[in-house]
Each structure stands twice: as structure tokens, then as C-alpha cells.
Amino acid sequence: MKIYNTLTKRKEEFVPIEEGKVRMYVCGPTVYNLIHIGNARPMIVFDTVRRYMEYKGYEVNYVSNFTDVDDKIIKAANAEGVDSSVISERYIEECKKDMKALNVKEATTHPKATEEIDGMLEMIGTLINKNHAYVGGDGTVYFKTRSFKEYGKLSHKNLDDLQGGNRSLLVTGEDQKEDPLDFVLWKPKKEGEPYWCSPWCNGRPGWHIECSVMSKKYLGEEIDIHAGGEDLVFPHHENEIDQSEAANGKTFARYWMHNAFLNIDNKKMSKSLGNFFTVRDIAEKYDLQVLRFFMLSAHYRSQLNFSADLMEAAKNSLERILNAAERMQGLLDNAKSEAMTDAEKELLATAKTFMEKYEAAMEDDFNTADAISAIFELVKFMNTNAGEDSSKEYLDELTGMFKTMTDVCGIITEKKAEILDADIEQMIADRQAARKAKDFAKADEIRNKLLEMGIVLEDTREGVKWKRA
Ligand code: AMP
Ligand code: ZN
């Protein structure tokens, strides 16, 4: 499996630190608003990387943070006259709903910056002790960039070029910096801002330190993959490397993966330009599996342009895949014979070449565009080479392969099966019978099963009433 590593600017064979295991950290969103479709790109792309690795048998420890202390959150909180945690908690919940609808698996851990302050204080303390950081007169703590000899190794920037071109790095309030390249690890509180006590001043962390700390806590000092959007290469990821490697004395991450941007009508999509769609905007018009399919139809390192026409095209393409899934299920349900014939064995060998193509594409730095082409080749093959006379065994093999391919990409979202009123009534009757027989465990089990299907029961004096949640 080859991964393009931003650090070396080359595709490299993936070798995990620990055999059979992957430790992966993906920088998550700042939660002050509903996420936009640009934010959804890294979520979808790296979830697909994770799914493919899991398919290959790796146990993936996947960590993705929520940045829940930040100027923009504080500004939104002040505008509403609420505590900043009200804003961040609200948008964490909303973000989780969007991720679920995009079929993004929950991370192994979703840490929040505000819950990791102790770890940040500890790492900042270590950096000061090791002379990689210093405290300014007002208690601001800065990382001493030039003390880390490899600064610039990820973004391939040269320190002196940065220095020359970046006088403006010396912004107001940061005038105690010894060097314009130094960056903030901890800063004093301002009126109306959340703050924590520290040995240096009451205040809050700079942005970069949270990821260094959370990555270390949940994955260890050295990890396999660190990922995020390409805008994070500099300064965020560069600074994370400095902090972690200076504090721990170990390589921070072996492979650095960055997705290219999602543009809109060929312009950079961003909140500040106001030319963005939230995931919710798209959900009003499309099933979100269409958005996921659209994102994966391009390689993650290629710029991707979003437009209404391209979304329509994605919807139509995905429909062909969904129709094939439905047709195959229908054939399977009605298959007349069990065992595969010799002719079918031969056909299956051809079908397997599409699976091989799919894997080869994914092994080549997760080329989902080519992987999806292989899915279409299989769809075309099934449409012509599977029918009412096909055996169950043959159909099973084809659908199994097809399902593996679509599941790794996560493009077919399982829909909850519609449950009929009559079935609900029957389950309620079974539950009543279990209660009468004092089999409360079974009664509870039935209630929970109904709940999972979105059916809420209410025991009233007139009997059991139910409603769809
Ligand atoms: P933020 O909330 O701005 O920190 O962004 C969260 C994640 O979304 C980061 O990995 C960003 O790089 C990524 N991101 C933001 N905008 C876009 C975009 N237009 N296209 C692709 N990725 C983006
Ligand atoms: Zn980060």
C-alpha cells in the first residue's frame, strides 16, 4: 500500500509502527457553525482510508479532535450572550449528525481541546524546561522556532525566506516575541473569554498545541498517519511537529496526508468569502450519500470543483450503482438453483479482475476515482452476466465483492428497513405475553428492538400506545 507523504513529497510503501495496527490522527473542525462541504472532504476522504485499512485487516485507532476554544467560538458566544461551551457543544452535536449522515464512522476517540488543558500545560512546561519555549512579560508563552533545527521540513520552507517575507508575522499583542517566527503556546485571557489557570498566566492555549497533546495521549508519542486539509500544512502541522518532536525527542508522525481543497465554481470555497454550502444545505436537495460519492469521484490530492451540474451527474452515476444493488438483491431472493455452474465459475474469474483493479487503485495512494471506475465495470458486468437463471452461489459471490467495494467507499448508506404497523402490533403483543409470563428480560429486549427501529412505546392505563419517533 503506497501513501503520498507530504514530508518526503513521494509515494512511499506503508509500513506501520506496530504490525497490524494503524495509529491515525485527523485534525477536526473548529466548532462555531454548521460544517460546510469543504470541511466534509477530509472527513470523507480519511474515513475511506480508514475503511480500506480495516478491510485489509488493520486495527485502526482513529483520533479526530474538535477545536472547542477559539476566537470565532468566543465571538459567536458573545453575539448570543451565552457561554462559549454552549456554542461548541451545540455544533459538536450538529457536526456529529452530519458525519453520521455522510456515513463517516465515529472516531475511536473524539477529544475536545477544553478537556485536555492539563496535558497542554504539561507539554508547554516541558518545552520551557528544554529551552524550546519562553515566557513573555505578560505571561504569553512562545515556541522558540529557531531552536528546532528541522523547522520547515513538512512545508519545505526555508527559515530565512520565511523571516524575510514575514515581517507581518509580528502581530499586535505579540510584540514580546524574540523572533517573528516564534508562535504562541499559551496566551493571557481577555475580558469575556474562557480561561484556565497556569503557572504563567490565567489564559488559554494557542491553536497548535492541542493536536500535539491529544495525539500523544490517545495514540502515543510516535504515530503512523497524521492528516488534514492542505491549508493545515503550514503553519499548523509544521508547528505541531516542532512542539511534539522538541518535547518528546521522537519522530511525531511517519506519514503526512493532505487533501486538496474543494472549490466552488472554480473559486476557493471559504467562510470568509461567503461562497460556501453547509452540509445541511446539500441535504435539503440530495441524499448525502450523493455528496460522499461526489467527493470520492476525484483523487483526494486533486482540487475538486463543486457545482450544481456536477452534483446532478454524481446523483445519476450513483443511481446506477444503487439500481445494480437492488437488482442483485432481487435475483438473490429468487434464485432457483444453489451451486455454481462451470460457466459461472469462469465468469466469476473475470469479475474478480474488477476487484483486483479496485484494490490496485486503492493501494496506489487511495485513488478512489479509479476504484469507482472499477465498481462501474463490475456493475456493467453484473447487468449483463447475472440474471434469473444464475445460481445463488454465483450471485452471492458477485454481491459479496460488490458490497466490499461499495462499503469501503461508504457510498451505500444502510437505510433503516421500513417496519409495518402490523409487525409493530405483533411485537407489542409478544412483549405483553413476555411480561405476563414474568420474562422481563425478553420484554425489555423487545422494547429496545422497537426503539432501535424508531418506535417508542408508552404504557398507559388503556394499554400500550406506540408512535414513530
Ligand atoms: P477548520 O474548521 O477550518 O479548522 O477545518 C477543518 C478541516 O476542514 C481542516 O482539515 C481543513 O483543512 C478542512 N477544510 C476547510 N475548508 C476546506 C475546503 N474548502 N476543502 C477541503 N478541505 C477544507
Ligand atoms: Zn491539528
Image: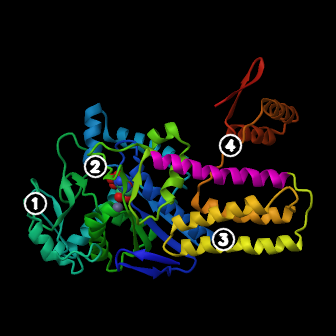
Q: Which amino acid, mark 2? A: Asp
Q: Nearer the viewer, residue 168 or 334?
A: 334
Can residue 102 be seen in this snapshot? Answer: no
User: Splitting the image into four quadrants, where does ligand 1 fall?
Assistant: bottom left
Q: Which mark is residue 168?
A: 1
Distance from Cα at disc 2 to Cα at disc 3: 45 Å
Q: Confirm whether the magenta stretch covers residue 208.
A: no
- Check contact, mark 1 vs mark 2: CB within 8 A: no
Q: Residue at x 88, y 35 (%)?
A: 437
Closer to the eye: label 4 or 3: 3
Q: Which mark is residue 70?
A: 2
Q: Give the quarter of the figure containing the C terminus.
A: top right
Against 349, is 282 above or below? above
Tell me if mark 4 has few (under 14), some (14-19) or many (20+) residues whose alpha carbon lies within 10 angstroms of its own.
few
Between discs 4 and 2, the one toward the N terminus:
2
Distance from Cα at disc 1 to Cα at disc 2: 21 Å
Q: Quadrant of residue 149?
A: bottom left
- Check contact, mark 1 vs mark 4: CB within 8 A: no
Extreme residue toward the top, this view = 462
Mark 4 residue's CB less than 8 Å from ligand 1: no
Between discs 4 and 3, the one toward the N terminus:
3
Residue under label 4, please give it: 416
Give the image location of residue 167, x and y in percent: 8, 64
Distance from Cα at disc 1 to Cα at disc 3: 53 Å
Q: Secondary structure at mark 3?
A: helix
Q: Which amino acid, mark 3? A: Met
- Check contact, mark 2 vs mark 3: CB within 8 A: no
Give the image location of residue 286, x and y in percent: 53, 41
Q: Which amino acid, mark 4? A: Lys
Q: Which amino acid, mark 1? A: Ser
